[in-house]
Image (spheres, helix red, strand yellow):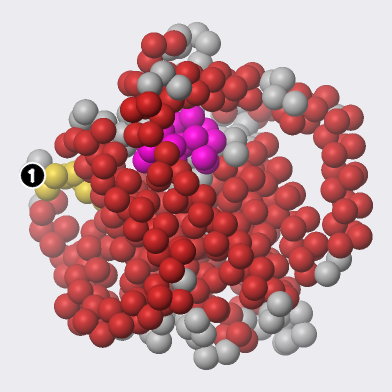
Amino acid sequence: MVVALVAIYFLLFFLLAWKNFRLAFVFFIILLPTYLIRFQVGPLPSTVLELSFGALFLVWLIKYSRYDYKNIWAVSQKHKLLFIAFDIFFLSSIVSIFVSDMWWFSLGEWRAYFLEPMILFLILVGRKNAVKISDLVWGLALSTVSISSYSVVQKFTGWGIATPEWTDEATRRVTAFFSSPNAVALYLAPIFILVIFLIINKKEKPKNLEFWGAVVIGVLSLLTIVFTKSQGAWVGLAAAVLAFLFFVGYKKIAIAMAVLGVIFALVVPPMRQAVLFQDQANQNRLRLWGYSWTFLGHSPKNFVLGTGVRQFFRKVQKPYYDKIVMERLIYPHNIFINFWTETGLLGMLAITTILGYTFYLANKIRKTNKLMGAALLGVLTVLVVHGLVDVPYFKNDLSFLFWIIIAFPFFYHENFYQSQTNVA
């Protein structure tokens, strides 16, 4: 029965992509949370998201890849630094499969977190005439609706919250379909900035269905982020808003708000404990970072190669593990240490270069389109700032989201859509 359903779904998505690749791509983005729907065909585990990607990729490979290769090559020649870093990161991820000592287990993680999302990035670069930036923005915005709607219901009912400790009404934290509140916030926060851009970009136009749709999505997303009580997301969003205001031209207001924010954080006891890493959650992060540095500094091999894919607990935390002190964790909760342990020193340096280059392109866009450039800088800011205390990449939906975000500046910089007003 499962095999039949899988075959039917794959065939239907394949036919949709064959007939209308652009629409199928939008549906794929909307379906990013469906990695949670898991199944197994024989010995091979998979997800609905992976099945959708497989159909999309197969259509692209058969129908478009031979044409898109020229586009990918041309863009790579214009942005050599980023694509060199891209290649190094990909090669580092392959090496990390075998560094892990559990290559078969790591291979499955590598496929979901590296191979498929990075192929998606190349497809986006190649399909410059078929997929528009508005498709990406609205696809991401619509992908949040089910998450946010369910989270708001959870807030007032307590239904389906992943962990009992978060169900009590006084301390309730929503988890939507995920296993933790942070997983919800990590997905919603960058997309929220894009939704705000959709709303602001329509301020001089009639308040049509798209405008009000963006407003509803924005309100639901913001409420959900608040209800997660994810302090990392709150700080990341605050930093993103300040970056947006600063780069859009309101520098004095941004600086004044930053000063007030710092004062507020230092005066309010719970916030002061959080920003000074005095609360339990941040004390645990400090422990994880300390364990990581101890492992990386233990030998030149560890320093250069890291732990390998998905081996953090076994190689780094396990020697210190005490379930009374801290739960079992699979990442060190810092974007740079995450990549260092998973993909080695070269992988971490490569992804840092990719992020830096994307910031550079976003700022370049700001000089010709202030609103869009500032929004992209805000998205990247929330990704990095929240990532300093969490894991913004190593999850099926987040890895795809990461590479879609990296692709955004290329859509503008390479004129991947006919007019900047298409986003609206």
Q: Which residue is found at the position 80% from the left and 62% from the top?
A: 246
Location of mark 1 (residue): 42
Magenta stretch in the rendered image? 330-344
Q: Residue 261 appears at what percent x and percent y?
A: 85, 43
Q: With respect to residue 85, does 263 lie above or below?
A: above
Q: Residue 183 appears at what percent x and percent y?
A: 50, 42
The dominant secondary structure in magenta is helix
For label 1, the crowd category at 10 Å Cα-Cα, with few meaning under 14, some 14 to 19 and many 20 or more, is few
Q: Residue 211 falls in which quadrant of the image? A: bottom right
Give the residue at the far front of this rendering.
Answer: 300
Q: Which residue is found at the position 40% from the left and 75% from the top?
A: 77
Taking the magenta stretch, the answer to whether it contains residue 347 is no
Instruction: Look at the image and tell me whether residue 122 can be seen.
Output: yes
Q: With respect to residue 6, does 92 lie above or below?
A: above
Q: Compare residues 359 and 29 and report the one nearer the observer.
A: 359
Taking the magenta stretch, the answer to whether it contains residue 338 is yes
Element type at marker 1? Answer: loop
Q: Residue 362 falls in which quadrant of the image? A: bottom right
**Does residue 363 appear to the left or right of 316 in the view shown?**
right
Instruction: Look at the image and tell me whether residue 126 can be seen.
Output: no
**Does residue 378 appear to the left or right of 411 in the view shown?**
right
